[in-house]
Amino acid sequence: MLVLAVLPFSGLMFCRAYADMKSPAWLDAHVQAFAFFGGVAQIVVPDNLATSTHQTHLGDAERVVRARYQQLADRYQTASFKSLVDPIECLVVA
């Protein structure tokens, strides 16, 4: 998995490769991006919905943020919203 995080106003980019798209790698990518940027954006917009969210009922279109991902957002005091587009892996919005 290739994770790309971008701060759109500065154009600063973070990119890191992982062996899989499982939750530990996804969460680590966020932590590493925050460290690289030297801070945390107020809003994070992940496009990897399978890792950051889950369906409450099979076949239901509504998705709920996974507990571990919400804990990460709470710890870093950021808000997470699902993406309306499908970029490579992760778009971070400041």
Image (tube, grey):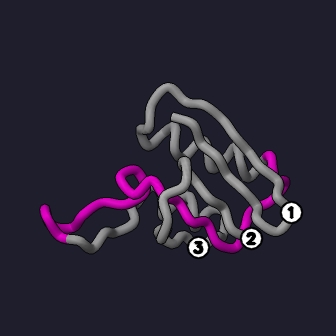
Quadrant position of residue 66 = bottom left
Kindly report which numbered mark, 3 or 2, lies closer to the viewer in this rendering: 2
**First reached walking from the N terminus: tag 1 or tag 2:** 1
Is 1 in the magenta? no
Between 86 and 17, the residue placed more toward the observer is 86
Residue denoted by label 2:
94
Quadrant position of residue 8 = bottom right
The local crowd at label 2, few if under 14, some if 14 to 19, many if 20 or more residues have their Cα within 10 Å, is some
What's the residue type where badge 2 is placed? Answer: Ala
Location of residue 16 in the rendering, given as x and y in whole percent from the top left corner: 66, 35
Location of residue 69 in the rendering, given as x and y in whole percent from the top left corner: 48, 57
Residue denoted by label 3:
79
Hey, which residue is sitting farthest top in the picture?
Answer: 19
Q: CA distance from mark 1 to mark 2?
A: 9 Å
Q: Secondary structure at mark 2?
A: loop
Residue lying at 53% horizontally and 60% vertically, measured from the top left? 46
Q: CB under 8 Å between callouts 1 and 2?
A: yes
**First reached walking from the N terminus: tag 3 or tag 2:** 3
Q: Is 53 on the left or on the right of 71, as rendered?
A: left
**First reached walking from the N terminus: tag 1 or tag 3:** 1
Q: Is 86 on the left or on the right of 17, as rendered?
A: left
Residue lying at 51% horizontally and 44% vertically, measured from the top left? 26
Kindly report which numbered mark, 1 or 2, lies closer to the viewer in this rendering: 1
Magenta residues span 36-60
What's the residue type where badge 3 is placed? Answer: Ala
Q: Which mark is residue 10?
A: 1
